[in-house]
Image: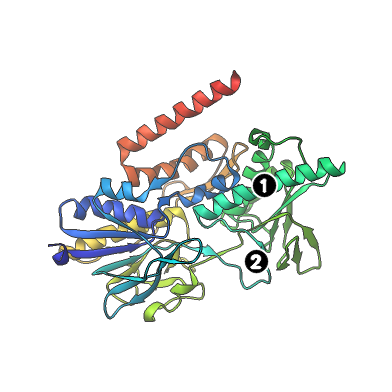
Amino acid sequence: MADELHKILIVGGGAAGLELATELGKKLGKSGRAEITLLDAASTHIWKPLLHEVASGTLAEAEEIEYMAQAHRNHFRFLFGRMEGLDRAAKEIIVAPINNKQGAELIPARRFKYDTLVMAVGSVSNTFGIKGVDQHCMFIDTTTQAYRFQRQLVETYYIQSYANQSRQRDKPLSIVIVGAGATGVELSAELHEVTKLLATYGLEGSIEVNITIIEAATQLLPALPPRLSQATQDQLLKLGIQLKLGRKVTEVTETEVHTYDGEVFDADLKVWAAGIKAPDWMKNLDGLESNHINQLVVDQTLQTSDPDVFAIGDCAACAWADHAGNVPPRAQAAHQMASAVAKTIVNRLNGKAPVKFVYHDYGSLVSLGKFSTVGSLMGSLMGTVSVGGFIAYVVYLSLYKMHQVAIHGYFRTAMLTLSNLFRRSTHAKIKMH
């Protein structure tokens, strides 16, 4: 019976992929009309805009979602693995072997069939081929990388603190973030907060921490209006974060970051957040059209040059109607793409036409942790409105709640929110005592 079912294979369990698998599981998997499978190289999911909080260690609750548990609750199947190739003639994807830490092969390369394939593998950092970035910078594209940075931050802080005490001199801990987009800016604010709380890790003594953002453009956060960009810049400067704008990085070494004008920045920790691209293995994936940053080119129904292959989220290059360029790689775009493709796939099984994807830009918001939230809201009635403070924070939080509702439904999201509020309240009381 399973062989007769329409096989829907979704590669990538980020915001777009997991929301799509969940919705299709409820609509098609539960009724036995299709077999839905989600493939990912990790076993858990964290909403990508939260990764800067994971990296800094300020994430207040266990936000990870177990793919297998989510699959069981929502009538789809989860496969653990990393896609490395596509055979369109056979309608199969190729999944890389799984090895242990010593390199021994545990599971050989596998192939999985599909009738409809949805690529939702997200994006990775774009190093632009700059010397030393791959070797010496840390990235925050995945949960694993975020946790690795968190460990490195604590270890480096401890080592520097001990060295300062032993040598009776004070050398600051230098953190350099390359890239002043949302990830770089939000991470800098979170790191400013966490470095003042590192005593909770049981460290003795304290050291000065210097945080520097280097950006090739002359403005922070190009997605925001200049006035809000300036407001964010002023807030970061108040926090003591150094901003080096209009500086293009030319090389990164083990201990330094070099810019085109000859300036050299000491750096104990280096984070690269200067741009994105789709994974390199997606370029010319079995003949599918891709652009210069490896994204799969799709039409207004999010279909690639192969009618049985779709792409959504950051790995999709979809022209933005009535705008120059493509739909921006944002969480709200991934959410909207997942909804559109879900409707199209249901229509395909019912012999109906695909749904045209129309991107609605609701604005951009950037959180500076407990210090501030700024952004712009957009709508057909109010145009573009600048917001800040508590209102901006509530809207920022609502974006995550929309993702949770898509994954868990309204009731479970409400329960998770109440549980989190109770946990924070209890934690606050314990700290007061």
Q: Residue at x 52, y 49 (%)?
A: 51
Q: Give residue 112's mark.
A: none
Q: Is residue 48 above or below residue 351?
A: above
Which of the 4 image quadrants contains residue 132? bottom right
Q: For residue 287, which quarter of the picture?
A: bottom left
Expressed as whole percent of the image width and height from the top left, the position of residue 35 reads 21, 60
Q: In terms of secondary structure, where does tag 1 sit?
A: helix
Disc 2 is placed on an element classified as helix
Q: Where is residue 3 in the image (x, y as percent from the top left)?
A: 16, 66
Name the amino acid type tagged 2: Gln
Mark 1 to mark 2 CA distance (whole Å)? 19 Å
Determine whether, in the image, residue 158 is placed left or right of residue 121.
right
Residue 182 is situated, as x and y percent measured from the top left of the image, at 57, 53
Inspect this view and state whether residue 106 appears. Answer: yes
Front residue (pair 188, 172): 172
Query: Looking at the image, which residue sits at the far top?
Result: 433
Precedes in sequence: disc 1 or disc 2: 2
Per the image, the residue denoted by label 1 is 155
Query: Residue placed at 28% from the left, 60% from the top?
Result: 37
Q: Mark 2 points at which residue?
A: 135
431 relative position to 123: left or right: right
**Going by the image, does 250 lie left or right of 148?**
right
Q: How crowded is mark 2: few (under 14 residues within 10 Å), some or many (20 or more)?
A: few
Viewer-proximal residue among 43 and 189 = 43
Inspect this view and state whether residue 227 appears: no
Residue 193, percent from left and from top:
65, 39
